[in-house]
Amino acid sequence: MRHLLVSILVVVLIAACATRGDIDAAMTRLAGRPLAEAIDRLGDPGDQVKRGDETVSIWTARRTGTYNVPDTQYVSHDGRFFAVTGFQNITYDHRCKLEVVVGPDDLIRTWHTEGDSAGCAALVRRLRE
């Protein structure tokens, strides 16, 4: 069981690096371009916030659900050991937030992402289109 969880963690960490790189690569191509190009790919932002002369457009994505993993318990009865296998429900909640900052000229200046690779996957797909 412990090996399975460690394996899942390693895969998630490796995927997180690749997805962050994918977002950064796509956003680097959009740097200095009009915000409308990001909107064409991502759809309308869920929120926009004014900060001085800059506007921050915010997109979010979220995936939730559960999956089952085997869970083996070892029990002893009358000096004999038995393996009893059941399943454990694992709940996941993957989130991603992309903030894109534009100046008064409406050109993309910078961006910031928060979240994990699975949460950001949907945004990456749309940015690649």
Image (cartoon, rainbow, N blue to C red):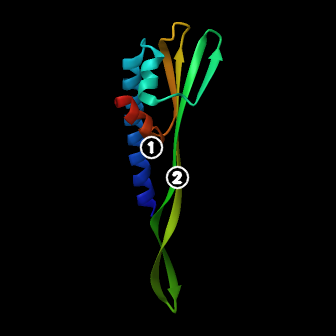
The type of residue carrying mark 1 is: Ala
What residue is rendered at 57% in x and 31% in y?
46
40, above or below 60, in the image: above
| Residue 66 relative to residue 47: left or right | left
What residue is rendered at 39% in x and 29% in y?
127
96, above or below 11, in the image: above
Question: What is the spatial separation of the Cα atoms under label 1 and label 2, in whole angstroms?
Answer: 10 Å
Quadrant occupied by the N terminus: bottom left
Q: How many labels does the image show?
A: 2
Tag 1 near tag 2, CB within 8 Å: yes
Percent x, y for residue 120? Answer: 46, 37
Judging by the rendered image, the residue that carries numbered circle 1 is 118
Q: Is mark 1 on a helix, strand or loop?
A: helix
| Residue 32 relative to residue 105: left or right | left
Question: Closer to the N terminus: mark 1 or mark 2?
Answer: 2
Q: Give residue 109's mark.
A: none
4, above or below 16, in the image: below
Please, which residue is most extreme toward the bottom here?
78
